[in-house]
Image (cartoon, helix red, strand yellow):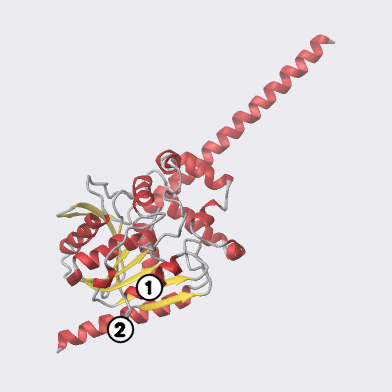
């Protein structure tokens, strides 16, 4: 009898071990498959451009007047390319670079937003473009605005969507963002980031700034798009960590009242990152700016695609036509 019980215990332990090994193997296989897909999605879409400020990764799409599209946090050229094509369509030449520390654009010793702006100007030089309209989202607004301030002759128009610009902090507001280990270690590991996305499927949705009231409107396709912009995390974490340290929770102040080109500011009233407040505050310093604040949509302007396209295309198109008419005259 004792021998039988010992055998049963040994058999149970062996089966449990086998199940655990099989489960781990299945997880490993799923992770490797997803990473292959993520890398394949990025492969062949971009190129490295040699500039006076160093190499910069860029992807292009469409034909027509050039628009530099600056991606937000946790992105890269793939985010900029998708945003540019979704918002502007194929009637513009979308130029979508990866900012410092994202994907194949290296992180230089001086990675300030001002240095990134100068690198954008150098990129336009390398592409033989005297100027372009500029569209930036979220954390990309810092370097895009610096470009407009430092090189105003290169920027025909500036469109800032849910911009991470300066907002006077509220009393008692935290002075630091998430713990450093989150972006220095967790997000530096493709496996840990992948595991987090699968164990907490709403994580990326929340981080993207979708309000809880709109979570039911998140389609599987849009959720996958957010994941695609997040993974592979290991080749984005250096840029993301830099953004988290230099842009959030309080973005540095900039002398935006000095901007002289046409400016458009876009946000949603329910953005949990409070960019609607940013837009209102910035508009007070830029009384000629065109301001669009939707009632809902969160940080990613969920459900506002058509209205965003209509507003931005109308604004950029008017600026481009005005520039063309001045050249004819």
User: Where does the image place residue 8, in percent across and percent down from the top left?
Assistant: 77, 18
Work out whether mark 1 precedes mark 2 in sequence or the reverse, and give the earlier one: 1
The total of numbered circles placed on residues is 2
- Assess disc 1: are there few (<14), some (14-19) or many (≥20) residues with their C-alpha within 10 Å of its C-alpha: many
Q: Quadrant of the C terminus?
A: bottom left
Q: Nearer the viewer, residue 215 or 90?
A: 215
Q: Nearer the viewer, mark 1 or mark 2?
A: 1
Query: Splitting the image into 4 quarters, where does residue 141 fall?
Result: bottom left
* Position of 328 relative to 162 (above/below): below
Q: Nearer the viewer, residue 73 or 233?
A: 73
> In this view of the protein, can residue 319 be seen by the observer?
yes
Residue lying furthest right in this view? 1
Query: Splitting the image into 4 quarters, where does residue 143 fall?
Result: bottom left
Q: Residue shown at 47%/76% (left/top)?
A: 306
* Image position of 205 (left or right of 44): right
Q: Quadrant of the N terminus?
A: top right
> In this view of the protein, can residue 89 be seen by the observer?
no
User: Where does the image place residue 39, in percent across and percent down from the top left?
Assistant: 40, 48
Residue under circle 2? 318
User: Where does the image place residue 118, in percent across and percent down from the top left?
Assistant: 20, 59
Query: Splitting the image into 4 quarters, where does residue 22 fall?
Result: top right
Task: Report helix, strand or loop for mark 2.
Answer: helix
* Position of 264 relative to 115 (above/below): below
* Image position of 230 (left or right of 92): right
Q: Residue shown at 43%/43% (left/top)?
A: 187
Between the residue at mark 1 and the residue at mark 2, the CA separation in whole angstroms equals: 16 Å
Residue under circle 1? 265
């Amino acid at each position: 009898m004792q021998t039988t019980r010992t055998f049963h215990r040994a058999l149970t332990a062996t089966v449990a071990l086998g199940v655990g090994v099989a489960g781990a193997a299945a997880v490993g296989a799923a992770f490797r498959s997803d990473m292959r897909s993520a890398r394949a999605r990025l492969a062949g879409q971009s190129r490295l451009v040699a500039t006076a400020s160093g190499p910069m990764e860029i992807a292009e799409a469409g034909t027509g007047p050039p628009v530099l599209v600056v991606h937000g946090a946790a992105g890269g050229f793939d985010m900029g390319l998708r945003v540019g094509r979704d918002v502007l369509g194929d009637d513009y030449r979308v130029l979508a670079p990866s900012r410092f520390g994202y994907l194949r654009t290296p992180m230089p010793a001086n990675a300030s937003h001002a240095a990134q702006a100068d690198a954008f100007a150098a990129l336009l030089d390398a592409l033989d473009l005297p100027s372009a309209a500029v569209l930036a989202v979220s954390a990309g607004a810092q370097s895009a605005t610096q470009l407009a301030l430092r090189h105003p002759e290169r920027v025909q128009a500036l469109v800032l969507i849910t911009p991470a610009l300066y907002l006077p902090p509220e009393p008692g507001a935290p002075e630091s963002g998430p713990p450093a280990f989150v972006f220095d270690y967790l997000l530096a590991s493709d496996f840990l980031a992948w595991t987090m996305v699968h164990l907490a499927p709403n994580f990326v949705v929340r981080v993207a700034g979708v309000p809880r009231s709109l979570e039911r409107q998140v389609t599987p396709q849009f959720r996958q798009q957010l994941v695609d912009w997040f993974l592979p995390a290991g080749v984005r974490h250096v840029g993301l960590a830099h953004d988290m340290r230099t842009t959030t929770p309080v973005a540095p102040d900039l002398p935006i009242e000095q901007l002289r080109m046409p400016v458009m500011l876009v946000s949603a009233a329910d953005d949990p990152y409070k960019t609607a407040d940013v837009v209102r505050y910035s508009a007070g310093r830029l009384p000629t700016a065109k301001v669009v604040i939707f009632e809902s949509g969160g940080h990613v302007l969920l459900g506002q695609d058509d209205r965003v396209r209509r507003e931005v295309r109308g604004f950029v198109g008017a600026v481009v036509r005005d520039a063309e008419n001045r050249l004819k005259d």
